[in-house]
Amino acid sequence: MSVVTFWNNGKEQTGKTLSMVAISTYMAIEHNYRILVVSTGYKDETLKRCFWKEKKARKNLGLFGPNTNASLESGIVGLSKIVNSNKISSENITNYTKIIFKDRLEVLESFSGGEVEYKKLKNLYPEIISLANNYYDLVFVDLDNEIEQEVSDKILENSNLVIANISQRLYSIDRFMELKETIPVLNSKKTLLLMGRYDKFSKYTIKNVTRYMKEKNKVLTIPYNTLFFEACEEAKVPELFFNIKSLENDERNSVFVEEVKRASENIMYRLQDLAATKM
């Protein structure tokens, strides 16, 4: 049971959330892990657009069946109420999630209420993530860069693995290299580096960036892929990944599949390596 936090510094567009979506969906299908995806953002509908379309009558539906607790208030708001009443447990977190694949993939969506209330609620994320880690095989956290440093640091500290997201730009690459000197976790085995929206025709290729940054391991990537990014706007990511086998032999899409698979395998290998080191 592990927490994997997707992090980036600043407001630069790195494709962080969509990279997390691709990897978590792939792993839920291919490896049969029970995964929770947590959005810590404020009124961020990225995950919603990827996975489901809101019904007129609010229902907590999953691809393989409805959440039996649909009447409960979903998301961080519902969880906050039981946290404050000291009734929270690992098992009842699932009552407040959106089910994508039953017993495989669930989403704790972002807060959509008032900004003042959000400022209070986001302090609960470290506790909720920690409790969820006792119930799910993997907890993927989309760490919002607007969260206060103290809360962000606590989430990173409690994470088993940090996926540091950068863009395919020299400024982003140099900026991350500077941050490695001041933020210890970024310069440890606990961190893997990933470039989202990767363009294989850029001069900043996997090989060149890995060499330039003097990384021991090849930088991970999630390539830009038209089918995937369209699916992310049409709530069709589950459908796309169920048919991903058909893309593997398609020259236009095979690189995307290969890189999602490589990222997933590297994440699991590093988690296993870190766990073995602690033993």
Image (spheres, grey):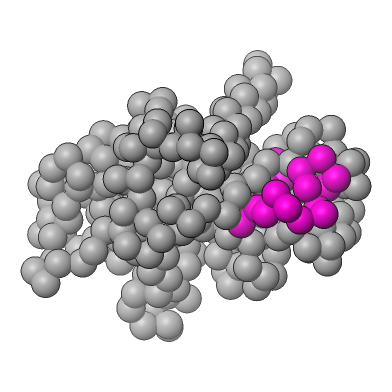
In this orientation, does residue 201 appear?
yes
Quarter of the picture containing the C terminus is top right
In this orientation, does residue 84 appear?
no
Residue drawn at point x = 23 percent, y = 38 percent? 102
Q: Is residue 195 magenta?
A: yes
Q: Which of 249 and 150 is in front in this view?
A: 249
Q: Where is residue 196 in the image (x, y as percent from the top left)?
A: 62, 54
Residue farthest along the front direction in this orientation: 251
Q: Nearer the viewer, residue 16 or 124?
A: 16
Q: Position of residue 192 (x, y in %)?
A: 70, 41
Residue drawn at point x = 42 percent, y = 65 percent? 46
Q: Give the range drawn in magenta.
A: 192-209
Residue drawn at point x = 36 percent, y = 26 percent? 32
The quarter of the picture where residue 105 lies is top left
Q: Which of 113 and 257 is in front in this view?
A: 257
The quarter of the picture where residue 266 lies is top right
Q: Where is residue 221 in the image (x, y as percent from the top left)?
A: 65, 45
Q: Is residue 185 magenta?
A: no
Residue drawn at point x = 28 percent, y = 52 percent? 97
